[in-house]
Amino acid sequence: MQANGAGGGQQQQQQQPPQGPAGPELGCLSAQNGEASAGTAASDQLAHANGLLPSANSGGGSPGGLSVNNGVPAAGGPGPASAELGGGGGGGSALKKKKRLSQSDEDVIRLIGQHLHSLGLNQTVDLLMQESGCRLEHPSATKFRNHVMEGEWDKAENDLNELKALVHSPHAIVRMKFLLLQQKYLEYLEDGKVLEALQVLRCELTPLKYNTERIHVLSGYLMCSHAEDLRAKAEWEGKGTASRSKLLDKLQTYLPPSVMLPPRRLQNLLRQAVELQRDRCLYHNTKLDSNLDSVSLLIDHVCSRKQFPCYTQQILTEHCNEVWFCKFSNDGTKLATGSKDTTVIIWQVDPDTHQLKLLKTLEGHAYGVSYIAWSPDDNYLVACGPDDCSELWLWNVQTGELRTKMSQSHEDSLTSVAWNPDGKRFVTGGQRGQFYQCDLDGNLLDSWEGVRVQCLWCLSDGKTVLASDTHQRIRGYNFEDLTDRNIVQEDHPIMSFTISKNGRLALLNVATQGVHLWDLQDRVLVRKYQGVTQGFYTIHSCFGGHNEDFIASGSEDHKVYIWHKRSELPIAELTGHTRTVNCVSWNPQIPSMMASASDDGTVRIWGPAPFVDNQDIEEECSSMDS
């Protein structure tokens, strides 16, 4: 690693005096506060890779001869003051005439210097620090860094004494020393120097009286028979640059950034900026890539509406009456649609073209199909009818055979169903007070009396069932200990609801109010989404898109509305249906695919605009209000 101030060409290097044991230092050209940093004596012969020469000052090789201002030699006299910003030294110094850099400017220069240093552009770093008068890091930190990277552990320990006054926490030095000695111990073991390692363990690590549990673990490594065994058990890279660099990253966390910058600080800031732009992008619907090489830092992040599922890709017209429900399978390979025409149609999704084709038609639902639920493994499908339907159908999707047709009483109304996460049970109910838990053969396992169910959902704990009822609320029912509790209370009837994958959020379609988002953990109303027309029809909304960042709902005004989860106003209104849109379903595996079912008898498949040209992406994403 070439240090700052070490000179550029071979000729200049040959004329340099030998360097001390501390090694070359980063930031050695600093002249902050009127003092030149250590290690500048040899830098008068500096030749810079960018073609800027040091000043032809008459300083006779003194550090003051290093002042360079955009390639123009400084006319100031010799001495450290000539590299200062804002005062001192010769009156002819070009740098002297500049106003002192702001703190933010100094921070940016240091960040750039750190990044350039990581790229090996050490001469450029030298010139940058020299001309700006900044310091990449404290001289003591530079010395400490060099000693750690060179494995000179005794010198690194001595450096800690110099750093003690710069560290805020009194316990930090002990922790830093522990990390140093741990690396020293492991390197001795790898080299086969067991006695020296034992000496470190007994006489240096143990007396620190810090992390005795870790010391016990370290002592166990004495039994390792060879170096590979040691590296595997210690989960350690071995003696060398990789493990010492990791050690430095850990040590840095105990030092203030004014002393030593956090590792890769500029890259981390840029990554955070890119992620923030993506988070604020209304149409961003792809997996986040944290690699900076995958984006351009020269322009702001842009997603176009044309890349979003706002365009009709396909119209499915095989149903011959109103389509009341649609739902993609959990693996995203199939779509089930239920209709007033008494059938359920299973559609196959082509993984390449994203086109759907009819796979199976399941017939015989005399009252029509108003609700469908896929089993967790997608092998089974349960279909329910409208209010006056007392039957429930359990279909084997693979064979197309009816496994169970369940009906407890002709007086029942079974209009909703939800699968237990184990795939072996499901719950069903309706507005006439039925609330059952059944197995795959339709056998009644448990029942809850007097609950008029509008919609159901099983939570991932396998115990709790959420049910919206006729009292404008959602309650949690535990079938194991037969307890129930209130979770959501609305002022108007809850026509339907769905739950996010993580179980935290509930999306409600509320009569005359529209779509509401609730936090189930805090039991608070988070947001009311605007635009949708919702009367007393049952309309089913959904979460969707990558990371479930979006919300979609049908509407009585024949449209599909899409919102970003954080925005109350719709980001898209999809037209095409000619009657009420009863249900929308977002493909859980293909974020750019969505389906909608309507009273007009059709199912529409939505996707990005065809033949999107990168040059057509002109619509920039609006920033979200905080």
Image (cartoon, helix red, strand yellow):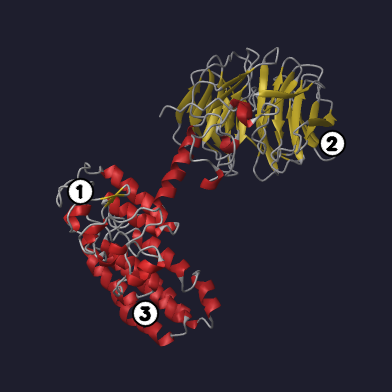
Foreground disc of the pair 2, 3? 3
Q: Amino acid at mark 1?
A: Ser
Q: Which mark is first along the chain, 3 or 2?
A: 3
Q: What's the residue at 77%, 40% (across, down)?
A: 441
Residue 394 horizontal/vertical position (percent): 77, 35
Is disc 1 surrounded by few (<14), some (14 to 19) or many (20+) residues within 10 Å?
A: many
Residue marked by disc 2: 400
Residue 122 lies, with reference to residue 265, above or below; the image says below
Asked whether 15 or 590 is in front, the reply is 15
Q: Of marks 3 and 1, which one's residue comes earlier in the chain?
A: 1
Residue beneath label 1, please? 93
Is label 3 or label 1 in front? 1
Measured in 3D between alpha carbons, the distance from the residue under mark 2 to the one under mark 3, in whole angstroms, is 69 Å
Could you tell me which secondary element the residue under label 3 belongs to? helix
Name the residue that disc number 3 marks: 201
Q: Residue 219 vs residue 616: left or right?
A: left
Give the image quarter of residue 30. bottom left
Amino acid at dot 2: Gly
The kind of secondary structure element at disc 2 is: loop
- How far, Cα to Cα, is label 3 from label 1? 55 Å
Query: Helix, strand, or loop for circle 1?
Result: loop
